[in-house]
């Protein structure tokens, strides 16, 4: 582990926190532009919808590779240089995606975009280093909510802009935005002191060793991955629900419904303050209970759009509150290894999210929306049991 004292400690202002949240949310949003557009992209290249689904797989696999092999470097490199450089690379691959002449090239550019768009995961540990002890929960909570908002907003904007200007316009606009953010980050980030030298192989090995050696880390990522699995299961299944009778909504209409989740993300941003007050552990339990209630409400009221909308708000508040607090606690385990801890957290969430998406696709034909909500409730129940059994042991501060 590196020495956290080598990192300058300066308070994160509200504007700096907001800038980090916007930059991180934009970076993560790059992974999700294509999700509502698969049929449109398939039609433009003359491929099947199943083949178009490979675009999401390529992007996510690239992102997983980038997180594991690049994000740990945040503990040993000068992030003032690395973060803007990654944003420039993302802009290049976004522009390449916008002009891709064939489907195979599109697969490659999106995979490379996934690898390069990890700048948001550099920003979270950096913000934890720069924040003072009494504001860290608020700062990290705001940025974590920004990352979640990036996912929700990207899905909505993508469908609307594509309907007006075509799917390529999405990637051109995103490329320009990433360039602007790169310039802003290069000017804004402070010059950071060099950290203790660690070899790259030793750095990656320490990521795996941390999981093996720390029960606290294992319990924390288990809860986080379970909740992320429920998150992706819910939102994937919601697309199936709203595209089917009695709703039969268009892509744009489904995107607008998804915006209701923004309410939850904004509300959950405030829970970071509970970490600063030493209340994060009970708040995680409350968040899990709220999530469980929302799933029951949604599963029994699927034929009412009003009930569905209310359940989306409750679900977003519960899930995002848990995710914000779990990630904040994770980054506080070892201040000198925040980038590696964030790598562990994000990779575990990626695995959980992949499981959730797979479950949604497999269970929808068998049990429909009620079946998905039962499966989600089981996963939340397991997370709640882990929280109950470990809150005075491996989760205790």
Image (spheres, rainbow, N blue to C red):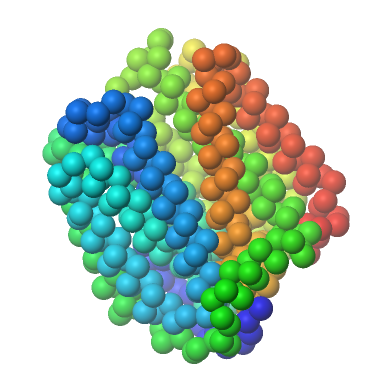
- Residue closer to the observer: 221 or 13: 221
Residue depicted at x 70% and y 61%: 211
**Can residue 264 be seen by looking at this rendering?**
yes
On screen, residue 238 versus residue 197, left or right, reads left
- Residue closer to the observer: 116 or 384: 116
| Quadrant housing the C terminus | bottom right
193 up-or-down from 302: above or below: below
On screen, residue 72 versus residue 189, left or right, reads right
* Circle count: 0
Q: Position of residue 312 (x, y in %)?
A: 51, 31
355 up-or-down from 49: above or below: below
Can you tell which quarter of the image residue 155 is in? top left
Residue farthest to the top, as pictured: 246
**Can residue 157 be seen by looking at this rendering?**
no
Q: Position of residue 176 (x, y in %)?
A: 20, 59
Residue depicted at x 60% and y 51%: 348
Q: Position of residue 169 (x, y in %)?
A: 17, 45
324 up-or-down from 336: above or below: above
65 up-or-down from 55: above or below: below
Can you tell which quarter of the image residue 1 is in? bottom right
On screen, residue 103 versus residue 303, left or right, reads left
- Residue closer to the observer: 279 or 193: 193
Q: Position of residue 101 (x, y in %)?
A: 15, 44
Residue depicted at x 49% and y 65%: 69
Residue depicted at x 63% and y 81%: 2
């Amino acid at each position: 582990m590196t020495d956290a004292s080598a990192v300058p400690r300066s308070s994160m202002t509200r504007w700096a926190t907001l800038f980090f949240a916007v930059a991180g949310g934009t970076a993560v949003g790059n992974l999700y532009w294509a999700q509502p557009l698969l049929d449109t992209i398939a039609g433009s290249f003359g491929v099947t919808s199943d083949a178009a689904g490979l675009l999401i797989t390529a992007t996510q696999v690239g992102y997983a590779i980038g997180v594991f092999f690049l994000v740990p470097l945040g503990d040993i490199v000068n992030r003032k240089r690395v973060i803007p450089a990654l944003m420039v690379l993302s802009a290049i691959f976004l522009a390449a995606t916008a002009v891709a002449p064939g489907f195979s090239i599109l697969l490659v550019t999106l995979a490379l975009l996934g690898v390069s768009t990890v700048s948001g995961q550099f920003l979270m540990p950096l913000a934890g280093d720069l924040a003072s002890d009494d504001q860290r929960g608020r700062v990290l909570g705001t940025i974590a909510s920004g990352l979640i908002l990036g996912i929700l907003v990207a899905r909505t904007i993508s469908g609307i802009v594509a309907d007006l200007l075509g799917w390529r316009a999405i990637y051109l606009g995103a490329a320009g935005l990433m360039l602007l953010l790169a310039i802003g980050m290069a000017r804004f980030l402070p010059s950071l002191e060099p950290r203790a030298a660690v070899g790259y192989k030793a750095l990656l090995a320490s990521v795996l060793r941390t999981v093996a050696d720390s029960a606290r880390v294992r319990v924390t990522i288990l809860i986080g991955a379970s909740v992320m699995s429920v998150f992706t299961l819910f939102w994937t299944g919601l697309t199936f629900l709203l595209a089917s009778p009695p709703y039969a909504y268009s892509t744009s209409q489904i995107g607008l419904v998804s915006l209701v989740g923004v309410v939850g993300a904004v509300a959950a941003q405030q829970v970071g303050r509970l970490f600063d007050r030493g209340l994060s552990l009970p708040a995680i339990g409350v968040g899990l209970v709220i999530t469980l209630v929302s799933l029951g409400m949604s599963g029994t009221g699927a034929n009412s759009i009003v009930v569905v909308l209310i359940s989306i708000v409750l679900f977003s508040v519960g899930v995002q509150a848990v995710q914000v607090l779990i990630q904040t606690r994770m980054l506080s385990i070892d201040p000198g290894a925040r980038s590696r801890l964030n790598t562990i957290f994000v990779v575990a969430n990626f695995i959980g999210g992949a499981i959730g998406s797979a479950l949604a696709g497999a269970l929808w034909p068998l049990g429909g929306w009620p079946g998905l909500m039962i499966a989600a409730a089981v996963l939340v129940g397991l997370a709640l049991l882990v929280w109950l059994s470990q809150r005075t042991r491996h989760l205790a501060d």
